[in-house]
Each structure stands twice: as structure tokens, then as C-alpha cells.
Image: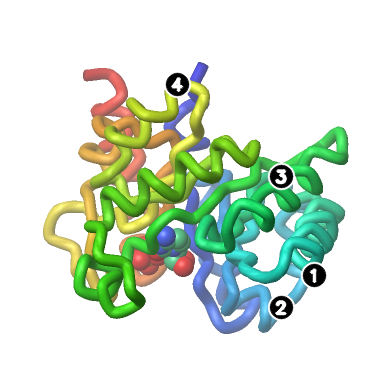
């Protein structure tokens, strides 16, 4: 059973200070419940911002994309769990030993967060992959990494919605697909290369949509969030 639309939109709080992030949340006026804390905000505000979001009853996706040796990543996963986050990320490219260590660490507590393996960044296209020695197209590489993560006990994946349908058919209904690179029609893609509209992401089988700049840089963030939520709702009911 999938959560309601307002629980499927994750707003990326890519801000340089806690104040800016909290003021955006206030401007959203309760429209969204999931918020993603990434490298920029975490480095500026640390665990205090996670605690504050939790105190407000919000769900936190801690997106620090761990990628290190297995022992270090397992310890980082345990530390993130203690903060009470609902989702956290590791890079699938860290390889099987690292992914198994992360999955074991994430499974140790009763309130275990959903561990997500980042497949191929939505900012990467074939040329970017080729320059790091990967000749497979992004869709093929994303599938390969997701299958490897699945075999290591990880059941959540970050991917572009462009490959969500293929991942879903390879991994089954239980897989949780989280898709950044979302751009409503007419929005600037910025640095993102593999972008998809909210409706197309839902059609492709995404469970959660991560949206940053189309909401955080909108003149009216609440209106932008509500428009995306309506698009999600309409796509679900089709
Ligand atoms: O502003 P925008 O909507 O592009 O923000 C997307 C967010 O999702 C950013 O915080 C980015 O770090 C994150 N992300 C991504 N691609 C991934 C994983 C995470 O864009 N593969």
C-alpha cells in the first residue's frame, strides 16, 4: 500500500544555513512531510537540523551518500540511525562488501531507516560515465548497480525516473524507488541531465519523488509544491 501523495514528495533542503531551510518549511505551510538534508545543509547545521525537523514531526531523508570502506560506512550508518532519520543513502558504486556492511548495520535497530543505494547520479549522462571508465549507458549501469545492491540486502534505490520502470521490472514490487531529477514542464533542468516530470515519474513506478530547486527557488514555494502534489495525485489516479 503506497503512502498518500503528500508523503511521496521529498523536498530537498539544499540551503547554506538552518534558518533558510526552516523558513522554507514555514512557507510550505504543512504541504509536505518529507525533507531531505544533504551535504550542504548538514555541513552547515549538523545534527541539530535533523533534531529540529524531527521535533516538528517531519520525516528526514539524510542524503550524505556514504562511499568509503565497509567498516567506516557501517559506523556512519549506525550514527545516522541514532539521529532518527527515516531514509539514508550509500553509493552503490562502493561495491558489495560496503553495501553488505551498510545493510547489516541498518538492520540492527528496531526503528531501522530505509537504506537507499544511489545508482547513477541524475546529473550524469553517457559522456560523464564514459569519463570515469564506464562505457555502459546510464540505464544499464543503474540496473547493474541496483541488482548488486539487492543481492547485498538493500531494497531501496535512488535512480532517475527514466530508468525506474526497468528497475521495477527487474527488482519487483517490494523495491522502493526514489527519484530525483524531477522537473515540472517548463522548469530549468540546471545541472541535472536525466530529468522527468512528476507525472512521468509516477507512471514509471517511482515511489518517492525528490524535488529541490523547482520548489525551493520558486517565487511561491507552497504553490509550486501544491502543483507538483496535484500532478502526482492525478497521475496516481489514472
Ligand atoms: O534541485 P534539484 O531538484 O535538482 O535537487 C535534487 C536533489 O536530489 C539534490 O539534493 C541532489 O543532491 C539529490 N540527488 C540527485 N541525484 C541523485 C541523488 C540525489 O539529484 N542520484
Which comes sooner in the sequence, label 2 or label 4? 2
Disc 1 CB within 8 Å of nearest ligand 1 atom: no
Looking at the rendered structure, which numbered label has been put on residue 173?
4
Asked if residue 13 lies left or right of residue 126, the reply is right
Work out how far the residue at label 3 is from the one at label 4, CA to CA, in angstroms: 19 Å
All told, the count of numbered labels is 4
The residue labelled by disc 1 is 48
- Of badges 3 and 1, nearer the viewer stands 3
Count neighbours of disc 1 (C-alpha within 10 A) and say few if under 14, some if 14 to 19, many if 20 or more.
few
Asked whether the beta carbons under mark 2 and mark 1 sit within 8 Å of each other, the answer is yes
Looking at the rendered structure, which numbered label has been put on residue 45?
2
Work out how far the residue at label 2 is from the one at label 1, CA to CA, in angstroms: 6 Å
**Does residue 212 appear in this view?**
no
The residue labelled by disc 3 is 103
Which comes sooner in the sequence, label 2 or label 3? 2
Looking at the rendered structure, which numbered label has been put on residue 175?
none
Work out how far the residue at label 1 is from the one at label 4, CA to CA, in angstroms: 35 Å
Amino acid at each position: 500500500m503506497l503512502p498518500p501523495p503528500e508523503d511521496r514528495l521529498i523536498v530537498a533542503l539544499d540551503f547554506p544555513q538552518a534558518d533558510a531551510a526552516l523558513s522554507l518549511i514555514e512557507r510550505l505551510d504543512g504541504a509536505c512531510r518529507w525533507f531531505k538534508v544533504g551535504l550542504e545543509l548538514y555541513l552547515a547545521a549538523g545534527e541539530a537540523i535533523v533534531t529540529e525537523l524531527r521535533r516538528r514531526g517531519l520525516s528526514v531523508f539524510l542524503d550524505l551518500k556514504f562511499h568509503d570502506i565497509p567498516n567506516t560506512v557501517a559506523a556512519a550508518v549506525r550514527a545516522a540511525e541514532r539521529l532518527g532519520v527515516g531514509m539514508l543513502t550509500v553509493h552503490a558504486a562502493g561495491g558489495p562488501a560496503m553495501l553488505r556492511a551498510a545493510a547489516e548495520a541498518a538492520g540492527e535497530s528496531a526503528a531501522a531507516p530505509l537504506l537507499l543505494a544511489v545508482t547513477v547520479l541524475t546529473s550524469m549522462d553517457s559522456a560523464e560515465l564514459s569519463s570515469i571508465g564506464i562505457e555502459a549507458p546510464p540505464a544499464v549501469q543503474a540496473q547493474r548497480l541496483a541488482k548488486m545492491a539487492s543481492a547485498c540486502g538493500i531494497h531501496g534505490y535512488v535512480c532517475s525516473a527514466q530508468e525506474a520502470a526497468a528497475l521495477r521490472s527487474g527488482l519487483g514490487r517490494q523495491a522502493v524507488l526514489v527519484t530525483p531529477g524531477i522537473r515540472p514542464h517548463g522548469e530549468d533542468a540546471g545541472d541535472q541531465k536525466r530529468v522527468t516530470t512528476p507525472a512521468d515519474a509516477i507512471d514509471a513506478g517511482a515511489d518517492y519523488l525528490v524535488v529541490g530547486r523547482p520548489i525551493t527557488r520558486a517565487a511561491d514555494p507552497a504553490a509550486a509544491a501544491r502543483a507538483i502534489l496535484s500532478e502526482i495525485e492525478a497521475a496516481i489516479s489514472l
